[in-house]
Image (cartoon, rainbow, N blue to C red):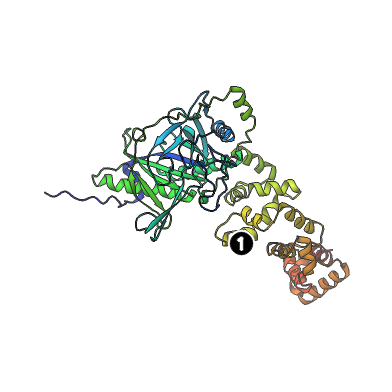
Amino acid sequence: MASTQIDTEATIAWDDVLASFDPVMGLEVHVELGTNTKMFCGCATEFGAEPNTQVCPVCLGLPGALPVVNETAVESAIRIGLALNCEIAEWCRFARKNYFYPDMPKNFQTSQYDEPIAFNGFLDVELEDGTTYRVDIERAHMEEDTGKSLHVGGSTGRIHGATHSLVDYNRAGIPLIEIVTKPLTGAGERAPEIAKAYVATLRDLLKALDVSDVKMEQGSMRCDVNLSLMPKGSDTFGTRTETKNVNSLRSVERAVRYEMCRHGAILQAGGTILQETRHWHEDTGITTSGRPKSDADDYRYFPEPDLVPVAPSRETVEALRATLPEPPAQRRKRLQGEWGFSDLEMRDVLNAGLVDLIGETVEAGATPAGARKWWSGEIARRANAEGGVSVADYAAERSITPAHVVELEGLVTSGRLNDSMARQAWEGVLDGEGTPTAVADARGLELVQDDGALEAAVDKVIEANADVAQKVRDGKVQAAGALIGQVMKEMKGQADAGKAREIILSKLTS
């Protein structure tokens, strides 16, 4: 009797997965440190340089070249470990992780194996509903990045179907910190959400530490998602797969969900999971098979003979602990209280990545409400329209600063501009026409200060809208809004709406 072929790429419905299985996750996040030079040599680390221009005998693995450890990278690793509530090793060393790949110039990676710089930590992750999930950290260890392969001639950018491949070794040797969680269990249906929230929380923490630019789209922070399923009621972990180099928060969430549905389909059909690496495809939202996953024994780790052990003194560790910034979650809660934002307003600010910009703008002299208003309005719309770049990046590219917001708000509070005029001035600033004051001058934006002209306009509007005026006389003060609108129209938007309201009510209710 012929055996049934199982489709290892099929999926089942999400509810069916949850009904039969519990997920187990392990997340490995690789972070490129923002040092000026590489981990073991003096080569530059600038992103986007011409291929193979930031290399030397050490990072190319040429015979006789000896590595030297980057002191700043070690200090960054310790600060990351401390921020993750880890123990810091009193003595640790590097190891050689042996494997062949074209973008690995030495045919081994200098990494850490059984003696990481930081271990046994945790990171508390706040989910959207306000609940907290504690992610236990297994280790954070130092290593170097590999080069980058470019597969040319195919339609997917991968080696399959390519006519030839190119290798750029500029990235080889850039300092990396790999942060590895312990197995995450008990997440259930929230596993994808927790994975995304963990990476987001970790990214915020690393950015606050100023150890990396954490730009996932450029590969300076990327996540490997390890996932397995175990039957309901079982405590034995299933066979895991590792989805490599997932480079966005949304993709981390989608990759977990997809792999859960794929594993569930195989297991329900009576098949077995192949321990392998998987490639994530952003365009289709699926993973595809990569290569069989190696175990630690396959890498033939042994201590790196060309590097001395790293043994930070307790005084050094405590000195670095003193440099840690306020934890991002704690800072956000403090700022929310200081700014007087509601939970919804603060969540919108967080989702738009505006906390730092608003903070800088408030420090420069703007009100919190004004800072939020001008950074989250037209400029956010334009940034999103240009491929979803952040407001901060959009503003930096156009030299728009917190001082511009302070100046704009000042034009409103001084009575020169009303809100409508201020929006026009801000649009001019975004279009590169100059500062808010310069734009207002050039466009002739200024409220009419002549009270006589304003009172004449009010009289004209009252006469032309006798029925509405009578409602105000009868006590329906809200009807004055319609008259104010007509006054603004009469004065071509250059009237002070508050002053117009005062005049209207004084004429109709006194």
Q: How many marks?
A: 1
Task: Identify the amino acid type marked 1.
Answer: Arg
Q: For this rendering, which residue is in front, 379 or 62?
A: 62
449 horizontally vs 296: left or right = right
Residue with the mark numbered 1: 382
Label 1: element kind: helix
Would you identify the image quadrant in which residue 41 lies? top right
The percent coordinates of residue 456 (x first, y second) are: 85, 73
Task: Give the quadrant of the C terminus.
Answer: bottom right
The residue lying toward the viewer, choosing from 213 and 496, is 213
Write the residue at 81% across / 60% down.
415
User: Taking 440 as reference, is 320 left or right?
Assistant: left
Q: What is the x, y in percent for residue 502?
A: 82, 62
Around disc 1, counting alpha carbons within 10 Å, would you say few (fewer than 14), some (14 to 19), or many (20 or more)? some
For residue 494, say whether it is visible: no
Residue at image position (31%, 35%) is: 233
Query: Is 215 left, or right, of 494 in this rendering?
Result: left
User: Residue farthest to the front?
Assistant: 64
The image quarter containing residue 188 is top left
Which residue in the rendered view is the most extreme toward the left?
1
Residue 258 visible at all: yes
* Viewer-side residue, 72 vs 208: 72
96, above or below 311, in the image: below
Residue in the picture at 79% in, 72% down: 491
Height in image: 181 above or below 312?
Answer: below
**Image spot of residue 291 (x, y percent):** 33, 46
Residue 114 in percent (x, y) is at 43, 28
Q: Quadrant of residue 211?
A: top right
Q: Is residue 478 above or below residue 366?
A: below
